[in-house]
Image (cartoon, rainbow, N blue to C red):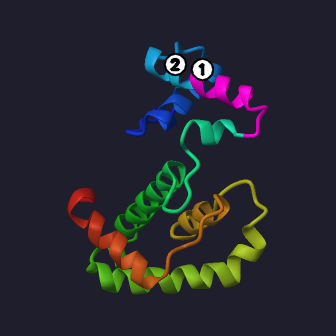
Amino acid sequence: MADKKRSTDPALQAIFDLVEHLMGGRRIPERSRILLMEALNASIASGFKTSLYAELGLKTWGGTSPVRKLELGRRDRRLLGLWAAVPEWSKLPPPAAAKMMAASAKRYQSDRWPRESKSFDAPAAEPAATWWKILRSGDCIPGERRLAQILHSGNSSAF
């Protein structure tokens, strides 16, 4: 895969390794191979009453799943990148930038998203490109308060 995915979760890493193997023929590391083999065997033995996803321990009952954490991390990195990319926002502290970003997102969702939601390509210009990518991935654009938290938490590490 072009984007070298790495996870601290062994089950999720095993899935990434399997995908890389299937897409590019890369050898599956022993640790991932054993984890996948055991989960597949257990799932088959149960007559698929227990999904492979659950056997790998990726299905959670409450809390945020490892897959969802990755999706949220990707969304948050996009938002931090957008903050840095828009000159009017990059100069503002997180709460003020979040207010401007939330207003922009709201306008995009009401004015442009209904027309652009079926498009295969993101708009060329920011911030519409980021709003499109987030919405197209099935995520929601966070509200002003959550945006401020994301910007604040990434402020020291992203720039």
Mark yes or no: residue 3 visible: no
Compare residues 99 and 139 and report the one nearer the observer. 139
Image quadrant for the C terminus?
bottom left
Question: As displayed, is residue 103 above or below residue 116?
Answer: below
Residue at x 66%, y 22% (from the top left corner): 41
Residue type at tag 1: Met
User: Residue 83: x and y, percent?
Assistant: 38, 69
Mark yes or no: residue 99 visible: yes
Q: Residue furthest left?
A: 156
Asked where in the image residue 78 lies, by quadrant, the reply is bottom left
Question: As displayed, is residue 45 above or below residue 150?
Answer: above
SS label for mark 2 = helix
User: Residue 29: x and y, percent?
Assistant: 46, 16
Compare residues 86 and 95 and report the one nearer the observer. 95
Image quadrant for the N terminus?
top right
Asked where in the image residue 53 lies, by quadrant, the reply is top right
On residue 59, the disc is: none
Real-space Cα separation, disc 2 to disc 1, in angstroms: 5 Å
The magenta span reads 37-49
Q: Which residue is mark 1?
A: 37
Residue type at tag 2: Ile
Tell me: 117 left or right of 80. right
Residue at x 30%, y 78% (from the top left corner): 94
**Crowding near the residue tagged with mark 2, few <14, some 14–19, many ≥20 C-alpha atoms within 10 Å:** few
Residue at x 65%, y 28% (from the top left corner): 42
Tell me: 6 left or right of 111. left
Compare residues 126 and 72 and report the one nearer the observer. 72
Q: Which residue is mark 2?
A: 34
Q: Are marks 2 and 1 in contact (CB under 8 Å)?
A: yes
Compare residues 139 and 80 and report the one nearer the observer. 139
Q: Is residue 43 magenta?
A: yes
Residue at x 70%, y 40% (from the top left corner): 50
